[in-house]
């Protein structure tokens, strides 16, 4: 039966409108109805450069996330490195490893920190090994320089004592500054003000395994605060008063310790009693912090801020050689729910002389079942079994 011409035109218009409607559903970012409007299933990522690729402006929410897909939705995170200009080659090597095994699939930005300005060569060469955006940040003096309350005569005397006890870098002021910055300053840098998660990377480290999921998203989706690969004992001579200061702090702050803490791990005395004795009650077992994947909200909490300020005032970053690793570890073990701390068993990692080497076809270039390819006595430095014993494998 022939359809009247006006009816046919109306039908065609209806079909066209229907097609347009469907197109809008599947291409919300390209709306031509309301230019500039942000659809409700998208949120603006404050870290992304609005002049960059479209994917950088709009970040899909978790239901649209597809692990392993190139350019899948990034969350609010950065790769982070404190590094000197002279360490460029080591940084490039570490970057190539991490880009090859992981970041080329996700393109998380890199943020580099330095106490002096980065050279043009450093900026150019590091940007060349990644498609992701690189940011180069200068550390403000007030975050780096020795605090005013440190007495230089006492510092000089302490350095002599530490050197007599074979504490490496005791006389290098910059090493003390670095440990303090990593303990309580990095996450206060204005460049990270809108960033939540970070993955710390040092020059010269190695990554061995292909990792096909977004570890930052894993952290967020699983409510994790902190991820580690290796646990080691520390030199007790570098931290004799760290635990006693911590106990003083706890005595002054009721209610700060989390009910599901890892105190038993922190205070274990069974495996290496002499370490516990010399560190005055702390096992010295710590997350080896040259690798850390963390949620900066923990470091930004009042509890941690109070703890860091207490330690900073006590002076042990300079009069002893408190490292950011034991400081972070004690804080996490006391103030965080231990179920929110994750062992990344699948991330093959090495900072000489230790490595984490999973037994997996995804890994190349490391020896499984060992902690080190250095001298065998180094194996006793591994204290992961303590973490597994008191907290579990996660
Ligand atoms: P180690 O791993 O304890 O032997 O210490 P490193 O020498 O590897 O230093 C730890 C990290 O801090 C590395 O990423 C270094 O590049 C960085 N670092 C240490 N001291 C300084 C410094 O004075 N300035 C800058 N910009 N980075 C530093
Ligand atoms: Mn190092």
Image (spheres, grey):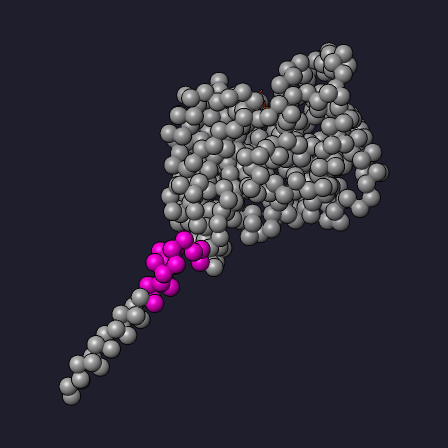
Q: In the image, is 262 to the left or to the right of 67?
A: right
Residue 392 at what x, y percent from top left? 65, 46
Give me the residue at 65% from left, 21% from top. Answer: 145
Q: Quadrant of residue 272?
A: top right
> Please, which residue is most extreme toward the right here?
251
Give me the residue at 54% from left, 37% from top. Answer: 199
Q: Quadrant of residue 128?
A: top left
Quarter placement of the N terminus: bottom left
Residue 49 at what x, y percent from top left? 44, 40
Q: Quadrant of residue 134?
A: top left
The residue stretch that appears in magenta: 21-39
Taking 249 as reference, is 43 above or below it? below
Counting labels gives 0
Is 81 magenta? The answer is: no
Give me the residue at 81% from left, 38% from top. Answer: 250
**Residue 276 visible here:** no
Residue 15 at what x, y percent from top left? 27, 73
Residue 371 at what x, y percent from top left? 56, 31
**Residue 74 visible here:** yes
Q: In the image, is 177 to the left or to the right of 368?
A: right
Give me the residue at 46% from left, 37% from top. Answer: 109
Choose between 368 and 49: the one closer to the eye: 49
Q: In the image, is 159 to the left or to the right of 296?
A: right
């Amino acid at each position: 039966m022939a359809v009247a011409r006006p009816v046919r035109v109306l039908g065609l218009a209806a079909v066209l409108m229907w097609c347009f409607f469907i197109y809008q559903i599947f291409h919300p970012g390209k709306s031509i109805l309301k230019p500039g409007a942000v659809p409700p299933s998208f949120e603006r990522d404050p870290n992304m450069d609005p002049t960059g690729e479209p994917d950088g402006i709009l970040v899909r929410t978790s239901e649209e996330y597809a692990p392993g897909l190139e350019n899948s939705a990034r969350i609010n995170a950065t790769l982070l490195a404190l590094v000197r200009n002279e360490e460029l080659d080591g940084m490039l090597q570490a970057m190539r490893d991490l880009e090859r095994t992981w970041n080329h699939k996700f393109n998380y930005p890199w943020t580099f920190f330095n106490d002096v300005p980065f050279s043009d060569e450093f900026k150019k060469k590091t940007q060349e090994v990644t498609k992701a955006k690189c940011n180069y940040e200068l550390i403000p003096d007030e975050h780096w320089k020795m605090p005013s309350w440190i007495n230089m005569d006492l510092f000089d005397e302490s350095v002599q004592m530490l050197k007599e006890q074979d504490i490496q870098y005791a006389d290098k002021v910059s090493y003390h500054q670095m440990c303090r910055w990593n303990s309580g300053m990095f996450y206060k840098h204005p460049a990270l003000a809108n960033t939540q998660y970070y993955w710390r990377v040092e020059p010269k480290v190695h990554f061995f395994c292909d990792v096909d999921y977004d570890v930052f998203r894993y952290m967020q989706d699983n409510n994790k605060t902190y991820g580690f690969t290796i646990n080691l004992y520390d030199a007790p001579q570098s931290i004799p008063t760290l635990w006693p200061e911590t106990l003083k702090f706890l005595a002054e702050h009721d209610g700060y310790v989390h009910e599901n803490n890892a105190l038993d791990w922190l205070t274990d005395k069974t495996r290496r009693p002499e370490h516990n004795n010399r560190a005055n009650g702390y096992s010295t077992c710590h997350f080896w912090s040259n690798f850390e994947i963390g949620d900066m909200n923990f470091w930004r909490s009042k509890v941690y801020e109070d703890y860091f300020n207490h330690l900073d005032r006590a002076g042990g970053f300079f009069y002893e050689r408190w490292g950011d690793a034991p400081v972070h570890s004690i804080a996490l073990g006391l103030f965080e729910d231990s179920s929110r701390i994750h062992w990344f068993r699948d991330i093959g990692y090495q900072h000489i002389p230790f490595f984490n080497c999973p037994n997996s076809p995804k890994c190349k270039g490391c020896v499984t079942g060992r902690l080190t390819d250095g001298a065998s006595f180094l194996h006793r430095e591994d204290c992961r079994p303590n973490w597994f014993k008191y907290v579990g494998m996660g």
